Image (spheres, grey):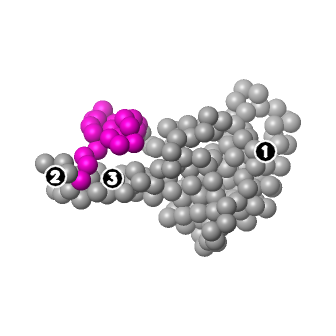
Amino acid sequence: MSAMTTTGLRIEMLGTLRAERDGTQAELGGPKQRAVLAMIVSEATGSIGRDRIIEGVWGEDASDENRHAFYTYLSNLRRVLGDVIVRTGDTYSLAIEPNSIDHLLFIAGVDEARRVLATDPGTAALTLREALGLWRGLCQPREKPLSAFTHGRAWTGSPRQPTVGWSDGREGEVPGPATAGR
């Protein structure tokens, strides 16, 4: 990732994609433009190639017209968000602090809960509940599902009793405060 900026920008993906700068919600545009941003944000700790973004947004319909639209969307997003989308060759990255992106905070919380689970299940449960509290609902149907952004973790169950499944096959309910540590 390139040099970080502290722009007062916060990007939220855990629900409908939105961005906020200093308390003011940014207008992110239509579904395809939002999908371009979602693809870049999904790789917020690294970079993503132009062709991968175009394929992810337009699929098999990628054409010269779609490439032109891609660059238009990037220009629009930079105008709205500032210069946080950085191009290096044919790849794009975000110059934003990781704690300004909710899905990275979520992943960090899940990882921390997993790290302390064996020695302190109560703290693990509270940490996981805090991470789950970052979710603002489900994705809108026009937006890509976020399952690709959870790095091997599948979330199921209800909001009241979520279930976590790890890519290594383990699965179980997230303990509530009353059952944590049992």
Residue 92, percent from left and from top: 67, 53
Residue drawn at the location 83% of the way across and 49% of the way down: 72
Query: What amino acid is at disc 1?
Result: Phe
**Label annotation for residue 70:** 1
Please say if the residues under marks 3 and 2 sit with CB atoms less than 8 Å apart: no
Please say if the residues under marks 2 and 1 sit with CB atoms less than 8 Å apart: no
Q: Secondary structure at mark 1?
A: helix
Residue drawn at the location 72% of the way across and 53% of the way down: 28
Compute the Cα span from label 2 to label 1: 49 Å
Query: Where, by quadrant of the figure, is residue 53 drawn?
Result: top right
Query: What amino acid is at disc 2?
Result: Gly
Q: Secondary structure at mark 2?
A: loop
**Label annotation for residue 128:** 3
Q: First in sequence, mark 3 or 2: give its number.
A: 3
Quickly name the residue at label 2. 181
170 part of magenta stretch? yes
Query: Which range of residues does the magenta coloring cover?
Result: 154-177
Q: Residues within 10 Å of mark 1 (few under 14, many from 20)?
A: many
**Label annotation for residue 149:** none
Compute the Cα span from label 3 to label 2: 13 Å
Residue 47, percent from left and from top: 61, 52
Q: Secondary structure at mark 3?
A: helix
